[in-house]
Image (cartoon, helix red, strand yellow):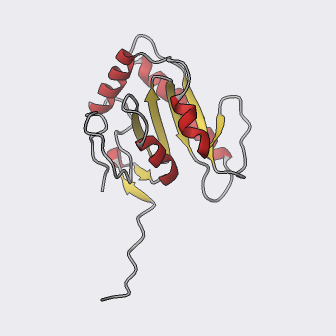
Amino acid sequence: MTDATPAPEPASLPGEHGVRVERLPAIDAILDALPVDFCVACHGSLRLAVGPSGMFVLSTPPAQGPAEPRALEVVRLAAQTRGALADHLSWVPFVDAMLVTERGQQHVGSPSLATVPIDLLRVTLVEGRTVVASKLLGSVRQLLRDDRFRPWAFCLPGTTTIDLSDSARSVAAPG
């Protein structure tokens, strides 16, 4: 018997294309539990969620320091993502930029960025009218599977449950 304390999980993992994938436990748990018609990808500290209610690039403010640099990164990658999709598809929906916050965290004021409390993230992503048709969802999923939608990679660090009914979600997390 030992009193050894298990080593903490790393804050980030090696990801696709040499990019470190940061763990975002609260967000990743919510994204992992989305309905199977959603697909999720990651890039560093950012996540892409695509479902019938829309396409969303999201992240959290950094643990320390100002939120503005992260917010600008989310907005920039949302625009870049829409442009990258336009290279592959004839019609591309708007890609929403979101900063997911804990209660009491500072909010970043920007017309290009929605600030969403963590406890409302699932509702924000799932509810709403259908704006992304199933054919478009399938196309995005295939681009991710084929690794043709960079910088996004099909992964969720720390994912513990895998939905085998959706081959898009059956890719194991790195590590």
Q: Is 126 left or right of 141, judged from the image as shown?
A: right
Picture layout, residue 163 above or below residue 18? above
x, y percentage for residue 19? 39, 48
Residue 151 seen in the current view: no
Residue 172 seen in the current view: yes
Picture layout, residue 48 above or below residue 59? above
Q: Residue drawn 54% across and 18% down?
A: 129
x, y percentage for residue 70? 60, 45
Q: How many marks?
A: 0
Displayed quadrant of residue 79: top right
Q: Residue furthest top?
A: 90
Q: Residue drawn 33% across and 27% down?
A: 141
Picture layout, residue 79 above or below residue 7? above
Q: Residue drawn 30% across and 89% down?
A: 1
Q: Nearer the viewer, residue 72 or 165?
A: 165
Q: Is 129 left or right of 22, judged from the image as shown?
A: right
- The quarter in which the C terminus is drawn is bottom left
Q: Residue drawn 42% across and 42% down?
A: 33
x, y percentage for residue 98? 59, 36
Q: Nearer the viewer, residue 142 or 66?
A: 142
Q: Is 105 left or right of 172, judged from the image as shown?
A: right
x, y percentage for residue 12? 43, 57
